[in-house]
Amino acid sequence: MAITIKSMTQSIKQKHAELTNHRIFGAVNSIADLRLFMEWHVFAVWDFMSLVKRLQCNLTNVSVPWTPPANSNAARLINEIVLGEESDETPKGKISHFDLYLHAMEEIGASTEQIRSFITLIQNGNSVESSLISVGAANPIQRFVNSTIEISKYGKPHQVVGNFFYGRENVIPDMFRSLLQNWNIEPTTVPTLLFYLERHIEVDSNDHGPAAESLIREITNDDHALIQEVLEAGLNAIDERNRFWDGLENQITKDLKSGYYCVKKEAMEKTFNTESFPWKQPTDFDDGIEQFIVEDTLNQTEKNGIRTRFVRFAPGARTKVPFVHDYHEEVFLVEGDQSLLDKESLSLLDTYSKGAYFVRPAGTYHGPFSSNEGCLLMEVHYYSALEGRSS
């Protein structure tokens, strides 16, 4: 049977419904789940802007000398979208939705190290594909982002807008509504994320979604061959998003079954006389950084066991290179301050204070770090959270 515009439109409606009812939105049952959700989803927040910028390049003139755009209606529509996405008015000031999402991540203790390291690699001229590999992004993240960049760079303008509308602006409000309806998170504990989600529901439903749909009409001018290619691009975009959510849902389920995010709260509430610890500086530690190992059954050959240790930085101490290892790591900043540095220039990227908590899956690049006033860290390293623990 020949594929028609009518049948393709029906397929998009069906896949849209499946996407907005994906199991992922009911799998976010704790702050730990939400952290992992955001550490994956932030890559989709980032790559979205490549679609937007590609359309702005096609539909307006961003070169010097300037010449008038071929379609002033299309130029106005995409410029309005860019204004909202790149410099929206938010509780954090006039910032991009990407930067707003980073604020939301930090607010709940989600790690921004992987995405920040990725951005740094891109800024230094590395390819998206190699940068994703370098920072240890999960395979579903790599596939999703690479597919977005592929169409952003090489797709025809009407195909890009098909991906943009059907894979993003048309479906995002319904996905975010589904997340808010199905997650087991108290909204008042995540105010910045709540604003981000509700803002997208509002703007994409009322402004950006209708604007993107208008772009399709402006670009295709009712040409049936072009419309069919728009729909094909939309179907592909929805399929890629479904695969992305599948991968994330599988990871959350896997972590839940293995006890990955299991943390004994009372372990952080004990009082320790750290001055009495027999602190030592291992040969691979930088000056001014020492450790005290509480328990160590971590076996990097057999890939099992656990290590619990305290690490302290003297005032002004810093590490010089990023860390990466094949075991998971959880870190609690007990006292003092710690800063994340750019791995090339060692310039300041972010600063954390007492009470900060980090969950780093195996393969996550992190650091370099420094401490202005000195700090005390409690670290747990493991391959499985249920292995190696004392009863």
Image: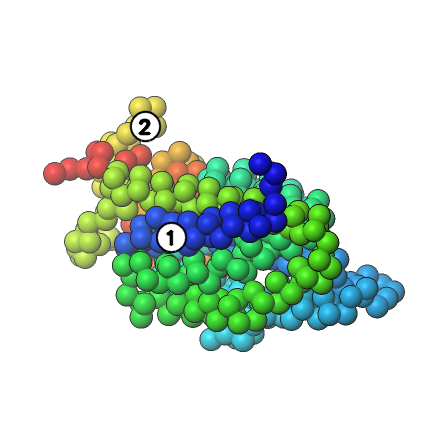
Q: Would residue 123 appear left or right of 330 to someone viewing this image?
A: right
Establish if 73 lies above or below 59. below
Across and down, in percent, residue 245 comes to 42, 46
The local secondary structure at tag 2 comes to loop
The local secondary structure at tag 1 comes to loop
Q: Would residue 312 appear left or right of 344 to someone viewing this image?
A: left
- Badge 2 density bin: few <14, some 14–19, many ≥20, Cα 10 Å: few
Across and down, in percent, residue 250 comes to 36, 40
Which residue is farthest top?
A: 301
- Which residue lies under the disc numbered 2? 303
Question: Does the rendering let one see residue 233?
Answer: no
Residue at 28% over, 36% down:
384
**Which three-letter amino acid code belongs to the residue tagged 2?**
Lys
> How many labels were placed on the picture?
2
Question: Does the rendering let one see residue 161?
Answer: yes
For the residues labelled 1 and 2, the Cα–Cα distance comes to: 37 Å
| Of 119 and 7, the residue lying toward us | 7
Which of the two labelled residues, at mark 1 and mark 2, occupies the earlier sequence position?
1
**Which three-letter amino acid code belongs to the residue tagged 1?**
Asn
Location of residue 190 (image quadrant): bottom left
Which residue is farthest left?
A: 391
Across and down, in percent, residue 217 comes to 68, 61
Residue at 35% over, 63% down:
180
Residue at 32% over, 67% down:
187
On residue 21, the disc is: 1
Across and down, in percent, residue 236 comes to 56, 44
Residue at 46% over, 49% down:
14
Q: Quadrant of the N terminus?
A: top right
Would you say the residues marked 1 and 2 are in contact, meaning their CB atoms lie under 8 Å apart?
A: no
Location of residue 356 (image quadrant): bottom left
